[in-house]
């Protein structure tokens, strides 16, 4: 009689995706508050040019210091450079210009419409399925965000010019999201993020010093703290997580998490900046949360 060798059952690996999603949402939503602090002490284009340049240098410098080789083809490096112009230079350049005359909460609300336009374009250009469940979830997200935005606009504290800049910022992040999935760059996302930051810094620096006044910079502890967060938490970590979620979840599902930015952004703006939040604003969170659930819930497999 032979005894069969027992083989231990493999342990299930810990799923880090929920942690990545949670950290991304926190970093991305707080970046609107840090950006609002930054632009009150520094012209937005100078702030962003310095932010992107430093982030790109830190990422690529750390890569070289660890002795890692260049992992991108020239084609992929060019793609990440183009993404840097769309996702960084245009998206945040326009968005930070808008933040000079709109609240951090409203800025986050407008950009949170990203999932709707991304889902529509992803269905047309990327072949991502658009089911009734996803469409219903996106519609609920729009209803919730629109209700919050409409109420805040009725108060009349935000500038129309600032809203227009923020809408243009929204168009840029949608374009960058679709381009990332459409062009599908290979290689290290870490190195790619460094390339995109450095490209954005190179593009914005001459523009910043042409149109912005360097003497308007007011160096304060608030500016230093905001700038540090924007470089490390925003440009380096949050964007790396964003690209990771795009690869793992797809454009529609990953973008749906932007519906979380309005409530989180308003919460951070209330805590840090003292921006006013009413109970009516918070009611919009209910359809937003339900919409995210419907968009990101895995489809049931046929039995």
Image (spheres, rainbow, N blue to C red):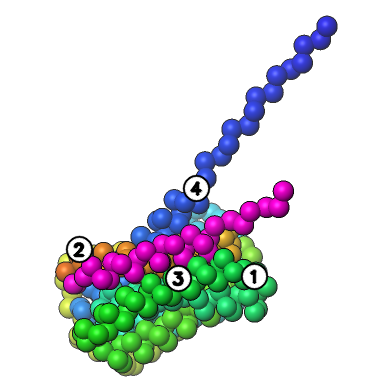
* Residue receiving disc 3: 140
Q: Residue at x 46, y 54 (%)?
A: 20
* Residue receiving disc 1: 128
Q: CA distance from mark 1 to mark 3?
A: 20 Å
Q: Nearer the viewer, residue 237 or 195?
A: 237
Q: Where, quadrant-wise, is the N terminus in this rendering?
A: top right
Q: Is residue 212 above or below residue 270?
A: below
Which one is in front in this view, the residue at disc 2 or the one at disc 3? 3
Q: CA distance from mark 4 to mark 2?
A: 28 Å
Residue 16's disc is 4
The mark nearer the N terminus, 1 or 3, is 1
Seen in the image, is 163 located left or right of residue 12?
left
* Residue receiving disc 2: 271
Name the residue at the top extreme. 1
Task: Give how far across and how far down residue 225 sits, in percent.
Answer: 24, 65
Q: Splitting the image into 4 quarters, where does residue 231 fall? A: bottom left
The mark nearer the N terminus, 2 or 1, is 1
The mark nearer the N terminus, 1 or 4, is 4
The mark nearer the N terminus, 4 or 3, is 4
**Helix, strand or loop under label 1:** loop
Write down the region rendered in magenta: 275-303
Instruction: Check disc 4: other Cα within 10 Å, few if <14, some if 14-19, many if 20+.
Output: few
């Amino acid at each position: 009689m032979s005894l069969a060798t027992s083989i231990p059952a493999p342990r299930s690996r810990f799923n880090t995706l929920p942690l990545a999603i949670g950290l991304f949402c926190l970093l991305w939503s707080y970046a609107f508050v840090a950006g609002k602090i930054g632009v009150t002490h520094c012209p937005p284009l100078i702030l962003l040019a310095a932010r992107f340049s430093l982030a790109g240098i830190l990422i690529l410098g750390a890569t070289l210091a660890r002795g890692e080789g260049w992992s991108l083809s020239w084609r992929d490096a060019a793609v990440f450079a183009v993404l840097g112009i769309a996702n960084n230079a245009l998206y945040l350049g326009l968005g930070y210009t808008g933040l000079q005359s709109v609240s951090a909460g409203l800025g986050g609300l407008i950009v949170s419409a990203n999932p709707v336009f991304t889902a529509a374009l992803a269905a047309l250009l990327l072949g991502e399925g658009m089911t009734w469940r996803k469409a219903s979830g996106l519609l609920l997200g729009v209803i919730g965000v629109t209700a919050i935005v409409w109420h805040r606009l009725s108060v009349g504290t935000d500038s129309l010019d600032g809203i227009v800049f923020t809408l243009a910022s929204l168009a840029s992040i949608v374009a960058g999201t679709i381009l990332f999935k459409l062009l599908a760059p290979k290689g290290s996302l870490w190195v790619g993020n460094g390339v995109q930051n450095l490209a954005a810094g190179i593009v914005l620096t001459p523009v910043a010093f042409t149109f912005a006044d360097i003497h308007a910079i007011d160096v304060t502890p608030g500016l230093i703290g905001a700038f540090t967060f924007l470089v490390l938490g925003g440009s380096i970590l949050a964007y790396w997580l964003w690209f990771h979620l795009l690869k793992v979840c797809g454009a529609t599902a990953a973008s749906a998490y932007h519906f979380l930015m309005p409530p989180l952004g308003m919460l951070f703006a209330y805590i840090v900046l003292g921006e006013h939040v009413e109970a009516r604003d918070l009611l919009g969170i209910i359809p937003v949360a339900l919409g995210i659930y419907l968009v990101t819930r895995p489809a049931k497999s046929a039995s």
